[in-house]
Every structure is written in structure tokens, then in C-alpha cells.
């Protein structure tokens, strides 16, 4: 595989590709408007994965950079899956200096438990203490 480059430079992100993936191919954000994706990027710590200058993966972290973080919108384009891209992205996320010493780092996943477990993520220790407001079809027309 060509050299993989992980960057937090928002100017390098292919926002059109990110939006297209999230709005058309993700399992969690079908129909999400471009303006919403842009606002999420603007207000998050973002990680782009690049092969030969072309973005092939994305992850974003919403955080106060002190006590809490939430990992979201992690994906690798289908043609690059199974090549270690998600592992490299997660290593970069976990090594980022602004994400050290957090009291809580959360995420939700339906199918990547093994990937996240490698980085210390576990089911909630006290699930009864967690609450949510969940609108799975918020972007449906």
C-alpha cells in the first residue's frame, strides 16, 4: 500500500466526499445536509486519511480538549477497507495531544467493536447512568 498520511488540517479535507459518504453510504447519517456536515467539521477536531494525496478516510472528535471527547463519523472508503487505514486513523486519534488525560472518551458503533477495543474502549461501566436523546431519522426527507 502507498504511504498513508493522517492529518488534522481541515483545509485538506474533501468536504464534498465526506458529505457524499455520510449522506448516501453511511448507516448513521443518511440524508444529512451539506451545511450540517460543514458545521460539524468546523466545530470538531478532524482527522483525514490520505493515500497519494486523495482522502480515503475520515474521523472527527467533538471535545473540550480537557475532560471529554466523543468520536464520530469514522469511515474508510470501500476500496481501501481491510488495508489498515482505520487502524492508522485510530492510532492518530488516540495519540493526538489534545485527547490525552480525558476523564471520558465515548463513541457509538454497530460493527467495529474490535477496532475500538484495541484502543481501550469498552461497554459503559455504568450504562444505567447514561442517557441520550436519539433521532435516527432526523435527516430523512
Image (spheres, rainbow, N blue to C red):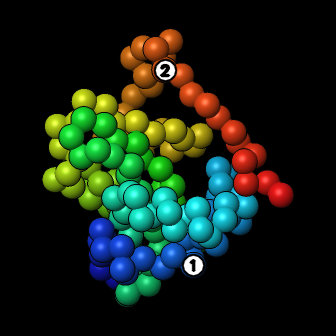
Question: What residue lies at 39% left-to-right and 28% top-to-bottom?
Answer: 122
Question: What residue lies at 79% left-to-right and 54% top-to-bottom?
Answer: 140
Badge 1 element:
helix
Vertical placement of residue 29 versus 10, above or below: above
Q: Quadrant of residue 134?
A: top right
Q: Is 123 placed left or right of 21 in the picture?
A: left
Q: Which mark is residue 1?
A: none
- Percent across and percent down for residue 22 are 62, 63
Location of the C terminus by quadrant is bottom right
Location of the N terminus by quadrant is bottom left
Q: Name which of mark 1 and mark 2 comes first in the sequence.
A: 1
- Percent across and percent down for residue 119 are 31, 41
- Percent across and percent down for residue 36 are 58, 62
Q: State the separation of the CA atoms marked 1 and 2.
A: 34 Å
Vertical placement of residue 112 versus 57, above or below: above
Vertical placement of residue 28 versus 109, above or below: below
Q: Which residue is mark 1?
A: 16
Q: Which residue is mark 2?
A: 130
Kindly tell me whether residue 56 is visible in this rendering.
yes
Q: Is 29 placed left or right of 98 in the picture?
A: right
Question: What residue lies at 39% left-to-right and 49% top-to-bottom?
Answer: 62
Bin the neighbour count of mark 2 within 10 Å (Cα to Cα): few under 14, some 14-19, many 20 and up. few
Q: Quadrant of residue 2?
A: bottom left
Number of numbered discs overlaid on the protein picture: 2
Bin the neighbour count of mark 1 within 10 Å (Cα to Cα): few under 14, some 14-19, many 20 and up. few
- Percent across and percent down for residue 127 are 48, 17
Amino acid at each position: 500500500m502507498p504511504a498513508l498520511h493522517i492529518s488534522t488540517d481541515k483545509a485538506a479535507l474533501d468536504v464534498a466526499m465526506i458529505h457524499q459518504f455520510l449522506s448516501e453510504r453511511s448507516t448513521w447519517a443518511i440524508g444529512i445536509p451539506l451545511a450540517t456536515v460543514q458545521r460539524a467539521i468546523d466545530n470538531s477536531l478532524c482527522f483525514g486519511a490520505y493515500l497519494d494525496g486523495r482522502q480515503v478516510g475520515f474521523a472527527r472528535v467533538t471535545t473540550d480538549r480537557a475532560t471529554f471527547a466523543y468520536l464520530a463519523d469514522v469511515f474508510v472508503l470501500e476500496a481501501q477497507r481491510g488495508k489498515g487505514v482505520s487502524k492508522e486513523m485510530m492510532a492518530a486519534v488516540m495519540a493526538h495531544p489534545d485527547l490525552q488525560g480525558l476523564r471520558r472518551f465515548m463513541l457509538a458503533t454497530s460493527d467495529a467493536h474490535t477496532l475500538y477495543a484495541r484502543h481501550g474502549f469498552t461497554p459503559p461501566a455504568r450504562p444505567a447512568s447514561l442517557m441520550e436523546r436519539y433521532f435516527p431519522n432526523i435527516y430523512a426527507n
